[in-house]
Image: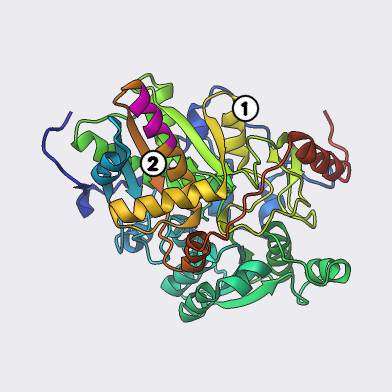
Amino acid sequence: MSTARQHKIVLDESELPTRWYNVLHDLPTPPPPYLHPGTGQPVTPDDLTPLFPMALIAQEMSAEQYVDIPEEVLDVYKLWRPSPLYRAYNLERALGTPARIYYKYEGVSPAGSHKPNTSVPQAFYNKAEGITRLTTETGAGQWGTSLAFACAQYGLECEVWQVRTSYDGKPYRKMMIETFGGTIHPSPSELTAAGRAILAEHPDSPGSLGIAISEAVEVAAQDPNAHYALGSVLNHVLLHQTIVGEETLLQLAKVGETADVVIACTGGGSNFGGLAFPFLREKLAGRMSPVIRGAEPASCPSLTQGVYAYDFGDTAGMTPLMKMHTLGHDFMPDPIHAGGLRYHGMSPLVSHIYESGLMEAVAMTQTDCFAAGVLFSRTEGILPAPESTHALAEVVAEARRCAESGEAKVIVVGLSGHGHLDLPAYAAYLAGGMQDRTYADHEVQESVREALTKLPAIPS
Ligand SMILES: *Cc1c(COP(=O)(O)O)cnc(C)c1O
């Protein structure tokens, strides 16, 4: 244990990890394959070529333990990586806890979140294979901003469908996307068949990530020079994010610590997987035994209340079927402030790891999250993204349990981004106008069962 009081644990540029870690290599059992919705058979690389470059398809399906990060990607990473790890002395003191809390801060990236860790390699591999245009969806706007930045780095066009509620409620992300050179549309839009179908039924649809995915996929599939880029959920995205956990392990080693609890918020699972998977490798190898815990919104509880079943990744049913924790592909989450956590499903890899008993999950209410975010800003001086406050709320709860039991656990938390463009959400919380939405289990199960009856038959 370190005796010197060191708030910020940094790595030199020369210590930047040069490989991503693929957790698939070390899992006791492999996750179930993605299925083609037409045939019910496992998808082949050929099924994915209209949407993704070969390099990413290979990463999606690979079980190699490590993937070398290309030089051209490391060069861009170095604009903000390695990112800092902080010891949260001030938060610990405010909570009166014997726990030692460390937070890995991804808000130092160009987009203010962890998402450029994958947008940069995705743009790079697409450019390398001759693609000139990338389409995508975005919720709160974090992913759209990240992809627009990455496209600007490599000279690609970027076209973004943003969930309607966020498009209206968070105009600064739209401005940032346009400043980085991207084009942005509210979703549902009249530009696609998927969008028009939703608008015909629900003219004031608030949109959802699932609908926006349908629109971006449809446009990419129709243009041979365009591909689609996904900011979460898929294996290759989580692979790219593992640079976060690899750096964190190096940083903890510098101060002689190992983790007892690793906590991150879960939307589609990418910042969670990125932080947690290298720790899971250590755990499976018997070198460390941290509890690994995802924190999700109570209003979009795919892990804690969803069903583990094959479902579509989007609302229109254009993606492969993925076995995952799902609320049903037509689930319409409440328009909460943590837009990045409003997704009906969960990464199939994270879902599989959850089912395998290798991680835990908890659901947090919005008011508890903002209370933790405000406490964190007043103690540590960083205003967290609403998404990240879910992890912080669980850290506060864990640290309080430590205060009661007297256990000096080491808690490591992913601070996935800053909330500088989410200030209206903080204003709403401070004004006392925030509502919590929770679901009874049966409410969720009914919605899922209903959605799953619309799926094509799956061979068992
Ligand atoms: C997008 C986002 C998330 C949620 O996405 P994951 O894939 O679950 O990580 C969390 N935090 C921030 C800051 C985000 O932008």
Q: Quadrant of residue 121?
A: bottom left
Residue 385 higher or lower than 441, as above or below:
below
Q: Quadrant of residue 383?
A: bottom left
Residue 325 visible? The answer is: yes
Quadrant assignment for the C terminus: top right
Q: Nearer the viewer, residue 128 or 307?
A: 307
Magenta span? 397-404
Task: Tell me the amino acid under the disc marked 2.
Answer: Val
Q: Position of residue 271 (x, y in %)?
A: 47, 47
What residue did someone put label 1 on? 355
Residue 129 visible? The answer is: no
278 to the left or right of 297 = left
Q: Position of residue 236 (x, y in %)?
A: 53, 47
| Element under disc 1 | helix
| Element under disc 2 | strand
Query: Which residue is pictured at 55% across the width and 69% down the height?
Result: 130
Query: Which residue is pictured at 55% across the width and 71% down the height?
Result: 170
User: Principal SS element in the magenta part?
Assistant: helix
What residue did someone put label 2 on? 413
Residue 184 higher or lower than 413, as above or below:
below
Category of crowding for the residue at label 2, using alpha-carbon neighbours closer than 10 angstroms: few (below 14), some (14–19), many (at least 20): many
Asked whether 129 falls inside the magenta stretch, the response is no
Task: Tell me the amino acid under the disc marked 1.
Answer: Glu
Query: Which residue is pictured at 79% across the width and 35% down the height?
Result: 442
Asked whether 403 falls inside the magenta stretch, the response is yes
Q: Nearer the viewer, residue 280 or 131?
A: 280
Q: Position of residue 31 (x, y in %)?
A: 63, 31
Mark closest to the chain's N terminus, 1 or 2: 1
